[in-house]
């Protein structure tokens, strides 16, 4: 019985598929909703979120191209949220939908999915 050699592309393809599976399964994404007091900074595409209206230390979040809902229920996806205008104005009460991505291979980050003016 004559054995045929295995074509070189088969083990190569299997190796690529295994590597893609390993890299692709090395992350987790956890959604959560947070609430706080925000001020728009920069050109309105970034906010600083505070635990309370009187807090002085906060976390920054990028909100560019994020869907947002105004306090009267209107859903928008362009420009800074109405409750955060003008940029640098007083703190506004907001709720954020975010996803925390933990990636063991590349990097970990937080992505804002939506913003709601309360």
Image (cartoon, grey):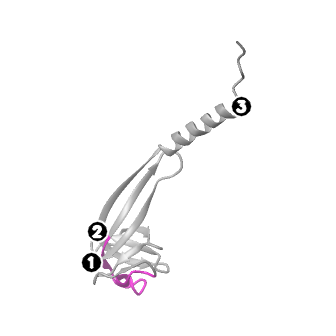
Q: CA distance from mark 1 to mark 2?
A: 9 Å
Tell me the residue at 28%/68% (across/down): 35
Q: Tell which of 28 and 4 is nearer to you.
A: 4
Q: Assign a secondary structure to mark 3.
A: loop
Q: Disc 2 or 3, which lies upstream in sequence?
A: 3
**Drawn side of residue 34 relative to residue 66, left or right:** left
Q: CA distance from mark 3 to mark 1?
A: 61 Å
Q: Tell which of 67 and 48 is nearer to you.
A: 67
Q: Identify the residue position indicated by label 1 in the image.
A: 118
- Mark 1 near mark 2, Cβ–Cβ under 8 Å? yes
- In the picture as drawn, the residue positioned furthest to the bottom comes out as 86
Q: Is residue 88 magenta?
A: yes
Tell me the residue at 41%/87% (across/down): 86
**Drawn side of residue 73 relative to residue 24, left or right:** left
Q: Disc 1 or 2, which lies upstream in sequence?
A: 2
| Above or below 21: residue 75 | below
Q: CA distance from mark 2 to mark 3?
A: 55 Å
Frontmost of labels 2 and 3 is: 3
Tell me the residue at 69%/34% (across/down): 9
- Mark 2 near mark 3, Cβ–Cβ under 8 Å? no
* Quadrant of residue 117 within the rendered picture: bottom left
Q: What stretch of residues is rendered in magenta? A: 79-95
- In the picture as drawn, the residue positioned furthest to the top comes out as 1
Frontmost of labels 3 and 1 is: 3
Tell me the residue at 63%/37% (across/down): 13
Q: Identify the residue position indicated by label 2 in the image.
A: 35
**Position of residue 109 measured from the top left corner of the image (x, y, whole percent):** 46, 57
Q: Identify the residue position indicated by label 3 in the image.
A: 8
**Position of residue 104 measured from the top left corner of the image (x, y, whole percent):** 48, 45
């Amino acid at each position: 019985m004559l054995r045929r050699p295995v074509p070189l592309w088969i083990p190569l393809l299997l190796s690529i598929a295994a590597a893609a599976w390993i890299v692709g399964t090395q992350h987790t994404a956890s959604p959560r909703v947070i609430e706080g007091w925000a001020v728009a900074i920069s050109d309105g595409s970034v906010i600083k979120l505070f635990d309370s209206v009187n807090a002085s230390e906060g976390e920054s979040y990028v909100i560019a191209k994020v869907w947002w809902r105004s306090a009267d229920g209107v859903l928008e996806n362009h420009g800074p949220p109405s409750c955060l205008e003008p940029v640098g104005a007083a703190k506004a009460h907001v709720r954020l939908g975010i996803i925390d991505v933990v990636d063991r291979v590349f990097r970990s980050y937080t992505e804002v999915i939506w913003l709601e003016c309360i």
